[in-house]
Amino acid sequence: MERTYSKTSLELLQADDWINIFEPSSKEEFKKASNVSQTGRRHWGSCCRVLVFTSAVVTKLGSVVLAREASKPLTIIDEAESEVSDDATTLQTLAIAYAWILISLIAPSVINSIFSLMTSSAREMKYPTKTLVTLALLSGIFEGIGVSILSVAVLGRLSLLSGISVMLAIVPFSSFGEFLNRLMSKSKRGLLVLGIALSVCCLGAMVYFNGNYSLAYLIPLSLLCIGYTFWSKNSPLKLKELKCFYYIGFLRSFVQIPTIVLSIWVIWILEGHDAASFWTLGFPGLGDESQSLIAGLCVVFGSFIVYHFGWMACSLCFQKIGFAAPLAVSSIAAYGIIFGVCWGTSENCVENSDFYWEVPIFLVLFIIQTLISRHVWYENIFPIPIQKALWSRTGYFSVGCEQFLLMNRREKALRFEVKRNQSQESLPTVFTNDSSSSSFGVEDVRTITSCNTKNETNHVFMCTTMWHENTKEMHHLLHSYLRVDAGRLETDDRTIYEGHLLFDDAVTPEGAYNEYVNCFLSLLPSDIPSIKEFITPYGYQLLITLPHGMKIYMHLKDKTKIRNKKRWSQIMYMFYILRFRVITSGLDINNVFILTTDGDTEFDMPSTRDLLLYLKRNHNVGGVCSRVFPKGGGPVAWFQVFEYAVGHWLQKAAENVLGSVLCLPGCFSMLRGTAVEEVMHTYTTNAETGKEFLQYDQGEDRWLSTLILKHGWLLQYAASADAYTYCPSTFNEFFNQRRRWVSSTIANLVDLIMNSSAVVKKNIAISHFFMIYQAMLLFGTLISPGIILMMMGAVLFACLYNFVC
């Protein structure tokens, strides 16, 4: 049946005017706030571009300068001279340069060892096999020997320009093992053959013109040792390391530290210096030689900045301008700086007679590097901040940092999925930028044709639970739906949005709509001529088509026919969508997502899109929540603005980094349909004990999140998605809300901690370290009232004691 609603002249507003019934500036304010994350993302992209380029140039210059300082010939000092010239090269000068080279080489290994150890203990439960441990240790030893020889023995025997050129050869030598990759096309294999052959010719010419024939074996030895770790980066054995990615990274970096120390010390001895003087003269006087000090600090901090901001650029989808372009141009910039500053001034830089072979060798090696590492110019489609999804191994080098990053970047980013029907293991999926798929021949690796949502149709059901919202709150909610209705036309993906509003106690005893339903209907735009009404077993259903075609279903619940309260409204739309709409409409449940909102929530299309992207990029994520801003006036609301920033934003960000978010707020979160399907039957359980009442009915969102976590799904926090919700403005409302939230939080945390062994075993994102962290927070929550009372009593006693005395 169909019913048409008449409107008064006050209600017959134009589509552009009705938005400004309340708060005329709210539209622009929300638009400005919602664009803050996008603007910040662009600013970070520009920042990454500048920092990566500058730091890469500084690191490369510092590496060659530091090597030249360590290879200067000793100055013969006459015993009759009482003073030594400032330009004289003493044994202490060389020892200090060697000490800074050692520090610059082991700093990345120390940092990566600490990071990998912390990450592996917090996230990984798979230990490497003996084969993987052996290969990791060998890789670390070879890398340590290679970078030590390159930093001292090779760069020290070459001019500054030749040092820049020889570092370009790291890329072709690192690709030497790619011949073993059976999936490589003939054209790419031919390019590698040509690149390696030309690189060998260029390095041979460099040795010939340089005249130091010891470089004939030192250069290939160092480059082959460094490139060994990348020879099998796309092999099945390398992909098996993903299950213990950080353990392997820790072993590799940990063994590098003593290898580098021993290698540098051996080189010092082989150069004819006293073994003990390396330790007695070098480290005590680290700050005595300004040139070595500056060059060493540039290498240490420059390589650190290049790696981490390059990682950030790839994660923010600014790989071309923030990663590939700066690294490619940095070698040219460093070469040009040396050439311009040192032209004709020193034989260590460049002489006019060497110009005819220095520049051609550099250009050939640069072109080879660009062609072999051309995969870094392909942009990511989704943000992928996970380290092992971007890099083939952990950590970085300080010498040749740019070349290491170019080869370390995966040609195809990985997406991690879970085999729900077999085991709860994180499995990688290959992201490609074309329609071709690739298979590595490993049973636990699955591939997809594309990560782009253009190739598949997504269905987002926006579900809102409502009760007694006021007119202002309804206005903002409807405004949000209209934003999505208009914004979905501007996106180029195949995503269908559909709204569902569930009103509790919406039917009067006489069978009519209550005042809240009529209030919501009166706020509809005037260009909606009619509303279709259907009689249902639970009450009524209204079908509304918005101006741009999006449909909204209003489910009006009759309390005499179906249960009231938010949890039962959630259960109602879960079964309606996943058990009725999915089956009757023939939808793929893997592409079904549920956006949960409250009746007073305000959001927009970019934030909705961001939540969807988080779920699409990682199929192990069962749900994602946004950053929520509280709205309201008065001291209670002002306090909650600060509380949301600390207790919600900071806490959820910490949980997201250390393990998994424990609670997805119902005001604005998106759930995966398959994750909800696994828990929705358990979610219908009636509370029979006091503990169950606190856990089930006092905090519905917290319990639903706990069930999803127990089934092995990851919950994430998306700070790029923003939403606004009205917070309690009076103390009574605030107290009642927190009384429910605190009791539910404690009950669910106790449940997770008591079942921590099963949760850690089933959920790859949660570790024992994370559960200990939650137990400490719970303990602090329980004792905090007593501590506050004790402090108040102590202050009161001190005041009374001073007054009496």
Image: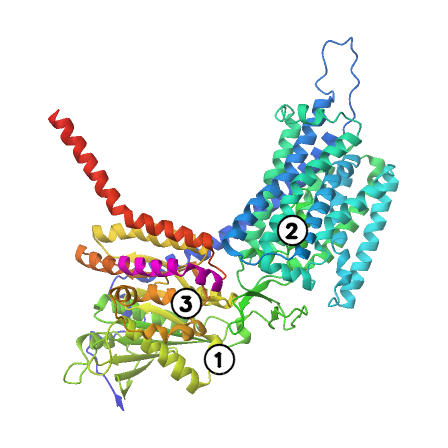
- Residue 626 visible in the shown view: yes
In the rendered image, the quadrant that contains the C terminus is top left
Residue 175 vs residue 397: left or right? right
Q: Which residue is mark 2?
A: 405
Instruction: Please tell me whether mark 3 sits on a helix, a strand or a loop.
Output: helix
Q: Position of residue 618 (x, y in %)?
A: 51, 65
Residue type for callout 3: Ile
In the rendered structure, which segment of residues is drawn in magenta? 742-763
| Image point (63%, 73%), residue name | 435
Q: Residue lying furthest bottom in this view?
A: 1
Q: Position of residue 675 (x, y in %)?
A: 44, 71
Between residues 544 and 739, which one lies in front from this camera angle? 739
Residue type for callout 2: Leu
Q: Position of residue 560 (x, y in %)?
A: 19, 82
Residue type for callout 1: Asp
Figure check: 47 above or below 350:
below
Q: Which residue is mark 1?
A: 588
Q: CA distance from mark 2 to mark 3?
A: 37 Å
Q: Given this view, does label 3 or label 1 mark the residue nearer the observer? A: 3
* Residue 537 on the magenta segment: no
Q: How many marks?
A: 3
Q: Which residue is mark 3?
A: 708
Local packing at callout 2 (Cα closer than 10 Å; few below 14, some 14-19, many 20+) is many
Figure check: 277 above or below 384:
above
Quarter where residue 471 is shown: bottom left
Sequence order check: which comes first, mark 3 or mark 1? 1
Sequence order check: which comes first, mark 2 or mark 3? 2
Figure check: 108 above or below 546:
above
Q: Position of residue 686 (x, y in %)?
A: 28, 73
Residue 411 vs residue 198: left or right? left
Figure check: 12 above or below 634:
below
